[in-house]
Image (cartoon, coloured by chain):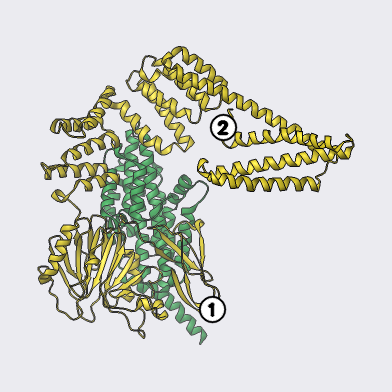
Amino acid sequence: MIVWISADSYKGAVDFWPAGKEQERMTAAESFPGASRRHEVKLTGLRAGTRYIYQVQGSQTRCQFQTQPPVNSPFSLLLLWGDMSGKLTSLLRSEVPEFVVTLNREVEEDQKDAFAAIRPYVPVYTIEGVDSPFLKLLNDSKQQKTRDPWSLDWAGLRLIFTDKTDFPDELLNAPAAHTIGLIVTPAGQNIDIEALSKSDFHDRLRQHNGRYPNSPVAFVAIADRQAEGVQTDGIRYLGPGTAGQNDTGAIRIDVDVDSARAVLLGENKEIVLKEPPLGEKLTCEDCRRLADKGAYEASIQAYLKFIEANKGHFQIDDAYYAIADIYDFKLFEFEQAVSWYEQLIKEYPNGTLVPLANQRIKHITAYSDFSYEPLTRFERIRAVEYARKKEQTSQRDQLLANVEQLIRQYPDSRLAPVMQLWLANQYRTFSPAKAVEAYLLLKKNYGPSDEAKEAAFEIGSTYYDAGQYRQAIAAFEQAMTELPSLSDTIKAQVARSYRNIRRDCIAYGCWAAVAVIGLLAICLKPRRLQNDVLLHGSVVFVAAAVLLYAGAWMIREQFNSVREMHSIVLLFALASGLSAACAVKVSSSLVQMGKTRRPLMSFFAGCGASVILFPAAIYLAVYYSYAHYLIVVHL
Amino acid sequence: MKMRFKLAGVLAMLLIPAAVAADQPNVPDQAAAEQYVKATRDLASRRIFEVGGREKIDLLFAAMLPVINSVDAYYATGYKDEISKSLQQCLSNTNMDINQQIIGKGLQHVTVQAIRRELDIMAAAAAAGRKASGERIKIYFEHIRPTFVRRDKGFFGDQKPLETAADQSIQRLIDAPETEFLSASRDLEDVIARTIALSVLYEAGELEKSRDTDLHFCDIKKTEATVYYRIIQSRIQRRSPKTNETILAMLNGNYASWNAVELEKYMVRGLAIPLK
């Protein structure tokens, strides 16, 4: 929500776009009607963790704001105390916080707004809640400041603001948070940080951390004290600020999923608030998260530390398998992968992962010739680069050429037929001719291999998929002689090919019928569009559409998509309307031309045209929208 | 009377930047910035090492020193020594390909740091001081403009989003009112970070293409990517130390572990801006 107050009354609107992408400019306007001096514009369609630039329409000034990042993303916040108004712009530029918390009490109304320069850029919170002069002006009841403890959730961080050490338990209940921080404002009490870290208050936080290790309380900041504080049981107590009136200062708090730190600006000092899990604190889940982020080497190191620090742990076999898996599928270092799989099998012969490990060893060792070189290079292309670039034609072609080159380089490797088959299968999606060529090469060069056994059938299927049914039949018949064990499957494919040829022929016939009758209707005098023809056609189209929509709606689950339902209904209605219009045109033209003296004959002639046109048009409608429905009428 | 006001105004215009600069020791003035940019251009040519001779190189390096020293002192970098060492190696024709990249990309880092320092000065300065800093930023930008042009061409075809955004934000820094300074400076920092991150990606992509065939070329690309990454490292490291570690692990790891797609994800996470 962007809010502002203007000198004149008008209806406010705001242009906004993601930073660096002005072409994605959007506009939002005030939702309530009429002009006003107070403006509230709600911006919608925003993406998480994105900086937006916004500009109030009519103003030249561009400002920015940052949306909350997703839960696992890192961010910084700024904790300020004292009068920092002269340094705010500089701090905001250099520290780039996502929001600012001031430990000062709320400013009195007659005092100058110290945060005016940065309000258009970041939200400002005081220890009593959101700090907004606009909302204060509106005298919003929700903004009545209370001294009750409250919490602020920002991308996985929960900040609890309280003026007493006794606060409700539900504020600690934050399952979505990865870090909890407390800001305690003693309000006249004399709190000793050392004593607090040994009090019942600390016990309560410690118990919480024991129960909820994934959302621990990481730090407690006591306002109006100045101390680096102590760290007890993983909870850091620190004191930003002093009780002195002239004291000023700022702390930047950097928060990430597994770490947090406070940087005392101006003192060049850093305090760790939450340590990243290391050594014995590291869990298998932490190691896996690293791999999920793509930090494979770091993940392996973490697993090694986990294994070292947790001997006898029930997840050690999982760690072995995970390391092998990273070497196998992510880094393509197959020798290492096999060694870890073997270690798993040796140390945990009854483990549930052993069959999978055996399977992978069998697969990898089958292609271990040439020191894994062809396997490493092929897997890197197949699993990483091709998956990533297959939509970009030039890069896709380049990668396929690389595989061809690899096959030429290692024609005798055990992986060569696998690569050749993969190559043919990839070509099949966009170039049937090249796919057939690749299958033929597979048959020719690697005939006895498992991969080449069904090449003849795959050639037939390639033609079939490309709609080249006559070539498909020829190829299938050839395959029948080579693969008698697949004769049932091949026969079914041949029958399908003949059926599809038949469907194509019928479609051509239908087009011919539509063209002949259409031309007849157009050529018969009078050659202009008569009102009654148009009227009859339209009435039949509308009536058919209504009836068909009603029927289709009742069986809507039968359609593949709503779009398909619409297209079939509208095409059917169009066929009905055109047939009706054609019938009227033919019969009325015959009557007017005096070709027949009997109007009944003209009527029958019109009906005849319609009877031919209607099924032809319906057939074409089904043929082009979803030909599979033709099996309903045994076509 | 009017004349007196005008004179006072002119005097103020001259004194305010000087006063602001006086607060910031060793800030190179406009002439030093121009001299620096001109020298970097001359040094960019490989031919200078072949025909220029030691004296010419020394002259060029001396012309760049005020800016390099100022950046080294302010940001505690060691570019004077690093660039000087690489220049000597180039002159003795030792590992020319790698050393030239260290000089070229290292100087780009110096330039970006000089721009950042000017932005720091602007954040604390009065209007006139900001204008002078803005003009110096405009001069510094000319050194890194070719990188923007190349990344525009490589990633966006005929469009020029990076160069246009940089020019616009520099102009806004000079012309726009004080209220817009934060916005314009962030825009400029973003577009610089985006261009440099795309440069890292570009070099990583080139390395991926050649890692099975040309290891010397990979060494050059690795040097380029690593020095480019230094330029944006502080921002990523501060925002997410873990992400920085992961990127460094990849850049310092063996060539098989380089993956431009993953690298892009990390950099987007660390910089919090879309790259493409």
Question: In the picture provided, is A337 more to the left or to the right than A403?
Answer: left
Foreground residue among B189 and A80: A80
The chain holding disc 1 is A
User: In the rendering, which numbered label is found on residue A213?
Assistant: none
Q: Which residue is mark 1?
A: A9
User: In the rendering, which numbered label is found on residue A632?
Assistant: 2
Residue name at image x 68 percent, y 28 percent: A509
Q: Is residue A109 visible?
A: yes
The chain holding disc 2 is A
Is disc 2 placed on a helix, strand or loop? helix
Compared with A200, B150 (above or below) is above
| Chain appearing in yellow on the rendered image | A
Residue B96 sits in quarter = top left
From the top left corner, tell me how far across and down residue B197 is, in percent.
37, 50
| Chain appearing in green on the rendered image | B
Foreground residue among A57 and B117: A57
Question: In the picture provided, is A486 more to the left or to the right than A35?
Answer: left
From the top left corner, tell me how far across and down residue B214 is, in percent.
34, 32
Camera-nearest label, 1 or 2: 2
**Quadrant into which the N terminus of chain A falls:** bottom left
Compared with A535, A467 (above or below) is above
Q: Amino acid at mark 1?
A: Ser
From the top left corner, tell me how far across and down residue A61 is, in percent.
48, 69
* Marks 1, 2 in one chain: yes
Is disc 1 placed on a helix, strand or loop? strand
Q: Amino acid at mark 2?
A: Val
Crowding at dot 2, Cα within 10 Å, few <14 / some 14-19 / many 20+, comes out as few
Alpha carbon separation for disc pair 1 and 2: 67 Å
From the top left corner, tell me how far across and down residue A102 is, in percent.
29, 73
